[in-house]
Amino acid sequence: MNQQPPIEKTSELEGVEASGAARASVLFPLPLDKPYDYACEGEPPPPGSFVKAPFGPREVAGVIWPSEGEPPSLDKLKKLGEIFETPALAPDLIAFIDWAAAYTMFPKGALLRMVMRVSDALDGPRMQTAFAKTHEPQGLRMTAQRKAVLAAAGPEPKSAIDLAASAGVSDAVVRGLAEAGALARVEVDPDPPFVPPDLSRDGPALSDDQQFAAETIGAIIAEGGHKAVLIDGVTGSGKTEVYFEAVAAALKKDGQAQALILLPEIALTLPFLKRVEERFGAAPAPWHSDLTAAQRRRTWRRVAEGQARLVVGARSALFLPFPKLQLIVVDEEHDGAYKQEEGVIYHARDMAVARGSLAGFPVVLASATPSLETVVNVDEGRYEAVGLASRFADAAMPDIRLIDMREYAPEAGKWLSPSLVAAVNHNLSVGEQSLLFLNRRGYAPLTLCRRCGHRMTAPGSDSMLVEHRFENRLVCHHTGFSMPKPSACPACNAVDALTPCGPGVERVAEEARERWPKARIAVLSSDTAPGPSSMREVLDAMKAGVIDILIATQVAAKGHHFPELTLVGVVDADLGLAGGDLRAAERTYQLLSQVTGRAGRAEKPGRALLQTYQPQAPVLAALASGDRDAFLAAEAMGRRDLGFPPYGRLAALTLRSLDEKALEQTANALKAAAPPADGVEVLGPARAPIYRLRGVARMRLLVKTRRNVHIQAYLSDWLKAVKIPGPVRLVIDINPYSFL
Ligand code: ADP
């Protein structure tokens, strides 16, 4: 990663003029790359302070930022407005925002917006009246209703609504008791503080491997300063217990220190919050997109005050206003969900390491299948690594076999080969659970006309419509467009000629229900179980053993423990390999080893069967032999030969427009303006693989450079020389993960 020079601390008095007025620069949470200058009386508030300042017709909330450029003449400046009481952003967060803006090539204000997402958090506490029990006054007239309220009340203040609800009365009764002096009115903050983690609690006794790993990380924390360290160990080897020790060590070291654990999926956070609570005797502050506005506000404010010491969150938690962040853990560091593709495009794992490096604290990465980027960073000595060799308590690794589908083909119109069917039969007969994994939602990924060959696509889009039979609709997974399945082909009008091609989970479920009518079968994908809570129900049912066969997409692959699951059948192990994206094999390896790792976690050994038409593919051979290091070495060699990340740098420049002509002209003009430079190749322009989505056409240029090239500097020189016309939009993605 390219380090920007560290920002210099400005002297607090710099810019103060003889008149007593001073320059204060304010960065707004808007797509602006620079702070704006204002005049203020006396010393300017320190950088990081939340303020209001006139911007256009309104006053807008922003943050005092280190000034840039020549000091302006103060008498021409507008006056700084109100200063909020919210604690100022820490200097390391300001440095991080500046760095991240330069790295991602998004405006600083767009990054600041991610910090300021909670719109009412700056308003401070809005105190609410609550009621607590006092001594019962003499001569109080008692009624059944009053008795019920007094029984529900306690020394902890509760709101009138809560008290009334638990007593089953109206809140007038509560207020009446307060008038009579039987309840005390107390002003309380509606964002209650978080219970601090109990650091005196011990975790479980660690195995030798775990102990060694925990001590190594403990020594890094004790020493202070930045270091990235990878905990590398198979699923179930006890990585989580090891990084809990690291969290405890970091929080113990300094009474004000805060720690953040990042997880890739919201669906994982709920059980994880419980696990943290068991370990530390207190639930951590949560941060993810499923929180209510009140929960977000509470976490944001309590983090800003330094009161919330442990946060568990999704990638955007990196932008919470921690005053004293001292440790970040990135669990499942290889997970693609860490890459944010909308708005500001960033990779949360890389950003976490950058944040730690700017602020000088350690960052712990954990994975059973670390990304090639991280493995290379370890090999080249930039990151440290600690390994956990086996599953905790020596639970056996699953036995993984390939099924060559060219030899053992299923019957026509079916998707499960005889060997997989026999394995499921066996599991049903001994009462053990099976998981059939297919990473494809819906019934069939393609709907084709048997008469004319027409493929069903969404209007104005080139993406295939996926049949969802349960809802009887055709759905575009890229835009969300959906329509009822037509009875006639829209191209040739042939009736009943539209044919589903290939399987999705719903189609495999149809086959499973036909084959095993008595089995308890459930389907799990993001659309069969919309929302984390209904997904939880299926996952809990699976855990409780009331499902015999679960047919699922990757939502079941991550982090769950199913004690009775002993067979994983991968319906199409080749699925992720097509598409020609540079990380296709790596992702397939990660996903399939994660899925197959679901089998046989406890005492029962498990097995995994992978259906494939290309058993000779190195990634599948590596999965079957369990030789991860050989696979990674081959992957690394391939990427090095091609100069792809992590051995070179990549940036994708995507142009989007409704106007295809303007799009093509701009793409060609952009290419023509690319300055020749040593170690830089500009590929394209080419149409994106899915060229049109909702009528918007997209073209791509790919910039590939040697690792020692400052790719952002190259891009900004280039883009300065080009004017992108109004109807075309340019989006830059540094180190792209998606090539669609
Ligand atoms: P990973 O994070 O590597 O997948 P976990 O930390 O979740 O592994 O550990 C897998 C299981 O083993 C969990 O149920 C965990 O509670 C248990 N476990 C791990 N280490 C210990 C230990 N030292 N003592 C008791 N149980 C442990």
Image (tube, rainbow, N blue to C red):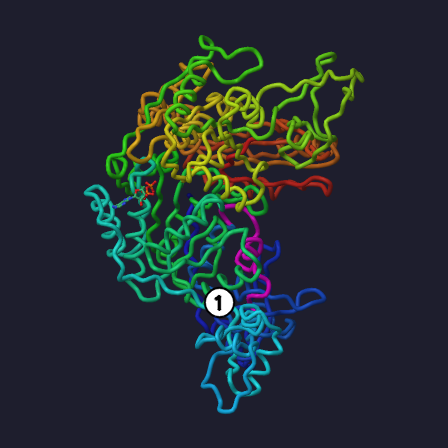
**Residue range of the region highlighted in magenta in the rendering:** 102-122
Q: Is 442 contained in the magenta span?
A: no
Residue type highlighted by circle 1: Pro
Query: Whole-percent x and y of residue 516?
Result: 50, 22
Q: Is residue 342 left or right of residue 405?
A: right
Q: Is residue 343 left or right of residue 260?
A: right
Residue situated in front as seen by the camera: 143 or 132: 143
Against 721, is 595 above or below? above
Residue 498: quarter of image? top right
Residue shown at the point (47%, 61%) measured from the top left: 321
Query: Whole-percent x and y of residue 568?
Result: 41, 26
For the C terminus, the image quarter is top right
Give the prevailing secondary structure in the magenta stretch: helix
Crowd rating for badge 1 (residues with CA inside 10 Å; few <14, some 14–19, many 20+)? many
Query: Whole-percent x and y of residue 172?
Result: 62, 78
Viewer can see residue 379: yes
Q: Is residue 56 left or right of residue 386?
A: right
Q: Is 107 contained in the magenta span?
A: yes
Residue shown at the point (50%, 27%) measured from the top left: 438
Against 359, is 613 above or below? above
Q: Quadrant of ligand 1?
A: top left
Question: Outermost residue toward the top?
Answer: 407
SS class of the residue under badge 1?
A: loop
- Residue designated by label 1: 47
Q: Is residue 77 left or right of residue 580?
A: right
